[in-house]
Amino acid sequence: MPPDPLLGEPAGVDATFSTAGVRFRFWGSEAELAGSGEDLHRLRSRLSVEARTPVTAEVSGDGNGTVILEQVGRPGPLRITFDERSRRLLIEGDDRTLPIFWAALEPDEVAGVESDSAVPRHVHLEYLGEGDDEWRAPDTLPLVVVARPSPAQATADTA
């Protein structure tokens, strides 16, 4: 990408946008994106502004440094991939399929009702199988998005 004339960064990359409260973990063939509801909502707000414009955000890694989450608009089903060497989590899709990922970043809406369960609210994004899933690519990385209580909520819940 050519540098942005004002920022000196590649066009479409906002070097100031960081979601330090969102953490990405990857193991084998599965991954998890976790954060407080507020942090996930902030990330969703940033990504869902425009599906056709590439968007990049930094998220905390699994102890191995920062992971770059990159969203790229392209025709076709939702595809989630992770390149361990470049530490890039790539989210690809179009105007009909990227909202599947965005909705997962609003776990309260997806999960529906509040719960006292010890299991945090979470959403699975994965291919459902041939004939059953025209919305997600067969080679998409299974990703679980987890909404953890914010530190303020956790303190209030234990008080």
Image (spheres, rainbow, N blue to C red):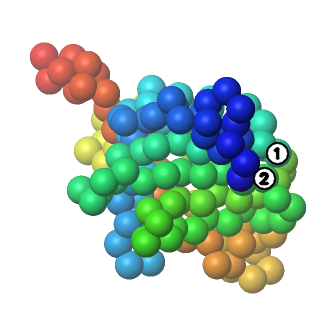
The part of the image, by quadrant, that contains residue 39 is top left
Task: State the image coordinates of residue 157 (x, y, percent, origin top left).
Answer: 21, 22
Quarter of the figure that contains the C terminus: top left
Residue 12 in view: no
- Depth check: give the residue in front, 149 or 27: 27
Q: Tell me the amino acid under the disc marked 2.
A: Gly
The part of the image, by quadrant, that contains residue 5 is top right
Q: Is residue 5 above or below residue 25?
A: above
Residue depicted at x 60% and y 52%: 70
- Image mark for residue 40: none
Q: Judge left or right: residue 119 versus residue 17.
A: left
For mark 2, give the secondary structure. Answer: strand
Q: Residues within 10 Å of mark 1 (few under 14, many from 20)?
A: some
Residue depicted at x 68% and y 43%: 3
The part of the image, by quadrant, that contains residue 131 is bottom right
Q: Which residue is mark 2?
A: 73
Task: State the image coordinates of residue 109 (x, y, percent, origin top left).
Answer: 59, 34
Mark sitting earlier along the chain (1/2): 1
Task: State the image coordinates of residue 126 (x, y, percent, origin top left).
Answer: 59, 67
Q: Tell me the amino acid under the disc marked 1.
A: Arg
Residue depicted at x 66% and y 51%: 71
Residue depicted at x 27% and y 59%: 64
Residue 75 in view: yes
- Depth check: give the residue in front, 83 or 49: 83
Q: Is residue 117 above or below residue 69?
A: above
Q: Which residue is mark 1?
A: 52
Q: List the single residue furthest toward the bottom.
A: 130
